[in-house]
Image (cartoon, helix red, strand yellow):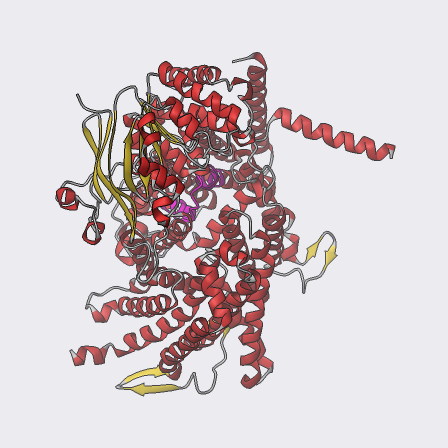
Amino acid sequence: MNSMLELRNVTMQFGGVVAVNDFSMHIEEGEIVALIGPNGAGKTTAFNCITGVYEPTNGEILYRGRTIAVNHPRGRMKRIYGGLHGDMYASRRVLNPTPDEITRLGIARTFQNIRLFRSMTVYENVLTAMHLRARQNALSAVFRISWKEEQRMREDTERLLKEQDLYQYRDEKATSLPYGKQRRLEIARALATEPELLLLDEPAAGMNPQETKELSAFIREIKERYSLSVFMIEHHMDLVMDISDRIYVLDFGSPIAEGSPAEIQRNQRVIDAYLGVSEDV
Amino acid sequence: MAGFFHDNLSYFLSGISVGGQYALIAIGYTMVYGILRLINFAHGDVFMIAGLVMVYLSASLPFTLSIPLVIIATVLLGFVIERVAYRPLRSAPRMSVMISAIGVSYLLQNAALYFTGGLAKVYPSIPGLSDTVVIWDATTKIVTLVTPFLTIALVAVLTLLIKHTKIGMAMRAVSRDFETSQLMGIRINSVISITFVIGSLLAAVASLLYFTNYASVTPVSGSMPGLKAFVAAVFGGIGSIPGAVIGGFIIGICENIIRGGASIFGIPGTGWTTFSDAFTFAFLIVILVVKPTGLFGEKAVDKV
Amino acid sequence: MDSAYRKRLIAIWIGIAAVYLAVLLLDMTLRPTSMLLTVLKKGAIYSLVAVSMNLLNGFTGLFSLGQAGFMLIGAYTYAILTMPGDVKTSESVYKYYECFITFDTGVFIGLVAAGLMAALFAFLIGWPVLRLKSDYLAIATLGFAEIIRAIFQWDVLGPVTNGANLLRSYIDLTRVTLPFTDIPFPPTLFVFMVSGICILIIVLLINSSYGRAFKAIRDDETAAEAMGINLFRSKELSFVISSFFAGISGALLAMFQYTVQAQQFKSMMTYEILLIVVIGGIGSISGSCIASFLYITLSEWWLRGLDMGTFLGISAPSLFRSGFRKLVFSVIIMVIVLFFSRGIMGDKELSIPRMRAAFARAAKRMRKEAAG
């Protein structure tokens, strides 16, 4: 049985800076996995490699056993560094999926710095994300031949907004919502693409303790309701320890630990990385 | 080979000359883009206005007065345009500033149209520049020979200015990171003003050289050289001054080789002149596709 | 669909029908050369091209400056196709070339072909150009329009395009007939119908799922991509559709002018269209239409005196001479760009409740002034 998502020796390099170094991990069906690490550890870069925003310098990413990204398309970087396993992937065929193809496969994401569609209302934000799964073409959409499909999209949007407790904000500008609600809306919008794997980039950032607590129940709830797997980056340790099945820790781009919340809490290297002990000695 | 070169010398000479003039205009584009990330669509029209001002001034003033006055007037024009049309939009979206630049271009062309009555104005012949010389059987004007040297001298001065003076350092800082340099206490507005002043000054010099060669000014005579100079700036890598210069020369030379297509390639046809304009833009599209950063440009990484 | 919405929809359709009826009446009663009809025709043509540009610049966030080029392709395609075969083979138009195309088609096929040809060019050019960032896209499309203009004047293509010489004797507005009859079609109504249908299609597009995808790209490319919207395909779609309608508007312009020449489709024309879009409000269809009619009315009619020596009864031939109108115009445009950058409509659409609210506000202000 293949893992849902698997990263093999993923390395991402910007010029001389190695943002992610030889990172391997996997997520199984139905798991909640967290990726933690100090600021600048390369967590968001890892996300961006998975979602096709960046092309990893080296390494391989598989979704349900199918390779979705391998090697750097131009192979320029690997001559400089290429990671520990550069040779292994150097000769592999280059795949370079765009973010929308990744989303089509069933991986949806949210953003660290909320990226809602500014000019649109809450309702339109979610409705726009329904475009991906709509069965129509440009002609049938313009001439309203597929009006039933449009109607279905609108009904689904209303249902989703109700489920996500956002229905009362339906006609408000998305950017006028309170911060916590904007995060919820981003998740709702991601859910509208009917994902199987949801990537959350710091979902609790900027939330107060009360909201954070609610968020942990909320993530569990959407995971059950939409039968999702969740992979998230988070700084709030309470939240991470509460809901994660497994945790990966990155420090300066390199993976330093992996395990259950209890194991991670005891891991000396993780403690050092967070407190900066090993650096100072 | 020597014979071929000899036969078509006039095309190569005017290519180098026009190339130098494009290079001078291109510097104005590339510096403004480097600092404001704005394609200053009005720059070509500033160049045209410089030509018109010369036509009007030289009618009543001697060249020793009118040439400096043209340069001063052009510099003032560039300064005022930035002050009135771009500065109020500093925090507006980039599209608004570009629209404003197009609006200025439209305004300058219409103003020129009004004052000239749409007629082509004869450019005065500047003694020393307009005289003809014969080199290796090719007849040309002195300006053709002067342009490349003058261009290179001006670029050398400009490079020294940017490398070694305080204001040059400020310019480099602003083009690297707008916000941070603001925080570091650099007076952004004066840096931008100086950029426009330098750009307009070079455009004024270019107009003296260019119109001496072409002998007449019309309200639209700025738009084509302007666009081509912009292509030169893109080709050299936008934001890079040596890039703009090299780009200017390459475009000028290629264009004139194509213009001489009938004799150089031995393919008959009268459409070569119109085609040489099209070439520049085809070239632009090819550059943008193959190497959008140009020869010396730096790649910008968007943060997600 | 609630009843208030349906009522509004009916009101809109009645309003549109009334406008068309009025146009038909004017067409029947006024002299064909009257200024009002000229302004209406040209205004409708510019509305279409402004709306097509707004689709790109306002709704998809692509700063494209190729509109004049696509209009040129449309105008030439239409003129060449509908020019009667015997005119093409005789020497009256193609004086220096042997015309390569000897058949001719009707108006409808000519218009559709004009759009399709522009769309084809857009499809080809979009492939390299739409991967560029905003300002590079602007310069590349502007450059493309210049290339098109140069190519259409190239003498090697003379047998098709008649080189740099003008094209005429094709089916212009006065020669359009009702289908299957010889009764002339009211020319102003014809222009209104063609551009009305085209604008309607653009409105339907913008309000469809695809239109939402375009707006998503305008708002945030990264987020749009993460929501599964293929950036390149959506941009290409928007670009091709916009060019299709620019092509049709070019054909309409050719019909309106009786003659057409590549020389007129300069970048200045694109600038004018862009400025119309800005005046109307970037992202507002009704704004673009209002601004087009306003622009054309002012420049062709009301401000004409500025060029002719006498304006508002003031006679100053030395000031009000040729070109003054455009100068005044460009100053007005700069004022709008700098101080009223939202234009007439902003990104809102003209609607009955909004108009009612605006009237109510104005009435309230007037009452207050009367009381105070």
Q: Residue drawn at (35%, 42%), measured in percent from left and top?
A: A41
User: Foreground: C310 or B260?
Assistant: B260
**Quarter-wise, where is residue B84 in the image?**
bottom right
Q: Residue drawn at (18%, 45%), measured in percent from left and top?
A: A84
Image quadrant holding the N terminus of chain A, namely top left
The relative height of residue C78 versus residue B124 in the rendered view (above or below) is above
Q: Where is residue B208 in the image (x, y as percent from the top left)?
A: 47, 76
The relative height of residue A149 versus residue C229 in the rendered view (above or below) is above
User: Foreground: B87 or B159?
Assistant: B159
- B88 with respect to A277 (left or right): right
The range drawn in magenta is C48-73
User: Foreground: C350 or B273?
Assistant: C350
Quick check: can you spot residue B244?
A: yes
The relative height of residue A209 versus residue C87 in the rendered view (above or below) is above
Q: Is the magenta stretch mostly helix, strand or loop?
A: helix
Q: Position of residue A260 (x, y in %)?
A: 30, 25
User: Foreground: A61 or A137?
Assistant: A61
Quick check: can you spot residue A39?
A: no
Q: Position of residue C206 (x, y in %)?
A: 45, 30
- C340 with respect to B205 (left or right): right
**Quarter-wise, where is residue A37 in the image?**
top left
- B103 with respect to B242 (left or right): right
Verify whether residue B128 appears in magenta. Answer: no
